[in-house]
Every structure is written in structure tokens, then in C-alpha cells.
Amino acid sequence: MAIGDSVFQLVTFQLGEELYGVDIMDVKEIVKIQNVRSIPNAPYYVEGIFNLRSEIIPIINLHKRFRLKKIEIKDDEMADEFEGGFIILNIDGLKIGIIIDRVARVISVNRDEIKPPPQMLSGIGTEYIHGVVRQDNGYLIILDIRSLFNPKELRKLLDIN
């Protein structure tokens, strides 16, 4: 997140019961669920790879990585609203897709609204969280995408395909 900016934008999305956000500057695009080809010997949280306009993108399943439950859709009318997809992140020039349950929206957040995360939040370690923003119906958890994957792990993911 750009230092000095007091307001920045987050792409928010749902994973299980929680609402998460990532800096819009790290998001390349959002795509609907695609066919993902599995990769032998990949880490347990790597769903596979898919081809996005001739670019091979590794797809990460944060549900598996953080042991989160997928959202349960109770009736057919809500199924369309909860159609999942991928957020394609650009982490220092490396593109990685993460599976999401539902895209929420883009919001603006004031830097002084961000509070440090509680010690343990829904199974995700605080080392992966930039901070939390209090909202009417709970918290928005801001992920630190650079800490989700260490550089060595990222290189390994890209060497898989």
C-alpha cells in the first residue's frame, strides 16, 4: 500500500464467512471460475494452473491454505449471487490467482480506520493480515498478499507449470 496516501481502495471478497480485502493496486483482474488443470506434486493449497490469454497462472486455494470452510448456499436464488471466481494478483511482477467465494465490491478505506488484527482471526495467522477495518456487520480483514507467499514459494509455484 502506497505510503503517504491517507485513502486507498480495496477489492473486497468473501471466503467462507469472512470478508477480506486486498489493495486494488495488486489486483490485475477478476475472472469467473475457469477449468483448472491440476499439477502433480504441487503443494496441498495449489489447485492447479489455468491459461489466461496465453499466460499460465497458478491458482491458490486459500480455503485449503487457511483451513477455511467454503460458504454454504442455502437456496437456488442466492446461488447466482455467490458465483465464485478468481482474483488475479500481481505480486511484484508474478501473477497468481486466488479462489474466492464471492466478489463483494471495491471500497475506499481511510488509513486511520485500519486497526491491528486480533491475535487469531478465523484461523488465518496475523502474519498474513495487514489490518482490520470495523464495519457495520463485523470486520473487513485486509490481507498482506506479499506475506501470503514468500518469494521462494512464489518462484517454486511458477516453476511448476
Image (cartoon, grey):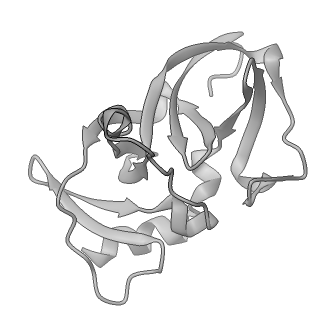
Q: Is residue 21 above or below residue 56?
A: above
The residue most toward the right is 119
The residue most toward the bottom is 41
Q: In this view, does 50 lie above or below 117?
A: below
- Image quarter in which the C terminus is found: bottom left
Where does residue 146 sit, x and y in percent of width and height? Answer: 59, 50
The residue most toward the left is 54
Question: For the point 32% across and 75% down, which residue is it?
Answer: 159
Left or right position of 140 against 103: right
Question: For the point 31% across and 77% down, which residue is it?
Answer: 160
Frontmost residue, 14 versus 115:
14
Q: In which quarter of the image is residue 41?
A: bottom left
Left or right position of 37 against 159: left
Where does residue 151 sit, x and y in percent of width and height? Answer: 54, 63
Question: For the point 77% across and 32% down, which residue is it?
Answer: 132
Question: For the point 71% across and 10% down, which residue is it?
Answer: 6
